[in-house]
Image: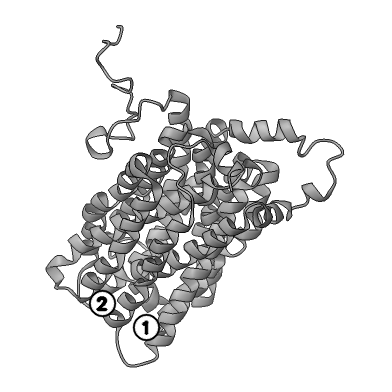
């Protein structure tokens, strides 16, 4: 049947995994091929979100089982976050060997790391397994943003990155749903981590459907990278890092500071929400799960809202709003009454995810194809260092008199600095990647 002339081009094209009433319609400029790429990369990242949700939800049970003092929790999470540092050394290879190959290897690594965590016998074992897992989690996440940015049209690039984050965040809901049964599952929190084997079992599907991006393939064809005789300075592993720092040094410096300050505020607040409601408000596991699932369904909408608005009114204004509102929600969450926690948690997730969408969009848009993967690797590095610094500061403050409700909102103010820094960058809304990387 021919489509009526008055129907929008995207009518009826929403795939099953993008419910139109919840996440809106697919932009008319996005074709079926782009939707397929987005779908499989998003499905793969669902498992990344599942792993990261477990630590926040099950921290109370892990602490009790492994004998970790509450005053050490800040340092405990800091060490796990530092596990992402090796990702900085891995991601530059994305600009040499391709997006697809490194993405699939990262899926294998995060799956094996999550599974190994289930067999931890001491806090040291747990931290070691999670550090390895975190390396591959953030590598996969960074590459996914690059794939989406390179494959989607300029008019819908913000939407695509937002949708990637929104739908893959279902993994948090899956982790919360499984956590609600932690009291009855055999081996408790360990059973939750054992499910990390699933991505490994699904690897043949990912290999079949996730292809190399057309932009990177053109880059290889144009530059002759990786070809016979390409054994000079420009093919060494650090050459993308060198190019990243020298092509647009001010952008590079600004991006590192933006990522670090935003992560410093975000991670400390979100890392302790589950522990806070269980330990300080006396909630049961199923109540925390309901909060994560119900309020989280609203909160993840921040990805899509930020992405769509960024494509319409600009990255800087939208990012500033999301980052500036976040510390207000943090103070209210940690100091407000128990009945308000679910609503405030939705506000925290909504603003955090919206702010991160803008930062990730900028990191993939402001630099050339030859080192676009490297720019996201630097983003991962600085987010890791920012998060570790925030958790270290919290750990030091916990040695003094006071509790989480006092210290965490103070640290969240770092996102205000990140909000102001957005105006150091050029506006990238609806501009082609090649024109952005060529401009100063």
Q: How is the image coloured?
A: one colour
Above or below, 105 against 417 in this view is: above
Residue 425, image x and y in percent?
Answer: 49, 54
> Residue 219, located in which quarter of the rendered image?
top right
Residue at 46% over, 34% down: 154
Relative to 107, 169 lies left or right: left
Gap between marks 1 and 2, in whole Å?
10 Å
Residue identified by numbered label 1: 70
Residue at 41% over, 47% down: 46
* Tag 1 and tag 2, C-beta contact below 8 Å: yes
- Residue 299 in sight from this viewpoint: yes
Q: Please state which of residues 345 and 314 is positioned toward the viewer in this rendering.
A: 314
Q: Please give the label number shown on residue 279.
A: 2
Above or below, 85 against 210 in this view is: below
Above or below, 62 against 433 in this view is: below
Q: Residues within 10 Å of mark 1 (few under 14, many from 20)?
A: few
Which residue of the protein is positioned furthest toward the bottom in this rendering? 401
Q: Please state which of residues 25 and 124 is positioned toward the viewer in this rendering.
A: 25
Residue 87, image x and y in percent?
Answer: 60, 59
> Residue 74, located in which quarter of the rendered image?
bottom left
Relative to 27, 114 lies left or right: right
- Residue 126 in sight from this viewpoint: no
Q: Please give the label number shown on residue 402.
A: none
Residue 48, image x and y in percent?
Answer: 45, 52
Relative to 88, 239 lies left or right: right
Residue 76, image x and y in percent?
Answer: 46, 77
Instruction: Label 2: state its secondary structure.
Output: helix
């Amino acid at each position: 049947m021919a489509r009526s002339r008055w129907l929008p081009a995207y009518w009826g094209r929403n795939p099953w995994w993008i419910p139109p009433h919840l996440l809106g319609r697919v932009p008319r400029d996005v074709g079926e091929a782009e939707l397929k790429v987005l779908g499989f990369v998003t499905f793969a990242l669902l498992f990344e979100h599942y792993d990261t949700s477990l630590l926040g939800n099950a921290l109370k049970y892990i602490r009790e089982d492994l004998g970790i003092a509450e005053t050490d929790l800040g340092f405990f999470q800091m060490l796990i976050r530092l596990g992402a540092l090796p990702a900085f050394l891995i991601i530059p290879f994305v600009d040499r060997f391709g997006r697809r190959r490194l993405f699939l290897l990262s899926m294998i690594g995060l799956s094996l790391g999550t599974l190994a965590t289930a067999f931890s016998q001491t806090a040291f074992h747990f931290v070691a397994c999670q550090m390895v897992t975190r390396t591959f989690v953030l590598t996969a996440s960074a590459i996914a943003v690059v794939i989406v940015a390179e494959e989607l049209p300029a008019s819908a690039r913000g939407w695509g990155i937002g949708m990637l984050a929104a739908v893959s965040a279902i993994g948090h809901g899956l982790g919360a749903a499984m956590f609600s049964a932690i009291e009855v599952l055999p081996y408790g929190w360990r059973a939750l981590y054992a499910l990390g084997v699933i991505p490994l079992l699904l690897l043949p599907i990912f290999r079949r459907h996730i292809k190399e991006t057309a932009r990177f393939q053109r880059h290889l064809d144009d530059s002759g990278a990786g070809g016979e005789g390409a054994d000079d300075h420009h093919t060494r592993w650090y050459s993308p890092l060198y190019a990243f720092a020298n092509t647009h040094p001010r952008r590079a410096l600004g991006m590192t500071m933006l990522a670090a300050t935003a992560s410093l505020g975000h991670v400390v607040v979100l890392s302790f929400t589950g522990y806070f409601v269980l330990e300080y408000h006396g909630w049961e596991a199923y109540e925390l799960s309901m909060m994560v699932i119900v309020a989280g369904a609203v909160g993840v909408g921040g990805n899509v809202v930020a992405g769509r608005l960024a494509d319409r009114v600009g990255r800087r204004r939208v990012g500033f709003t999301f980052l500036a509102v976040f510390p207000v929600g943090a103070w209210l969450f940690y100091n407000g009454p128990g009945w308000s926690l679910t609503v405030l948690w939705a506000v925290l997730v909504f603003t955090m995810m919206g702010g991160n969408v803008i930062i990730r969009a900028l990191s993939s848009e402001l630099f050339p194809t030859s080192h676009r993967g490297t720019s996201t690797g630097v983003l991962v590095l600085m987010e890791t260092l920012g998060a570790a610094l925030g958790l270290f500061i919290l750990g030091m403050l916990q040695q003094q008199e006071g509790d989480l409700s006092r210290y965490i909102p103070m640290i969240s103010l770092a996102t205000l600095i990140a909000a102001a820094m957005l105006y150091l960058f050029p506006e990238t809304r609806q501009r082609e990647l090649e024109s952005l990387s060529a401009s100063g």
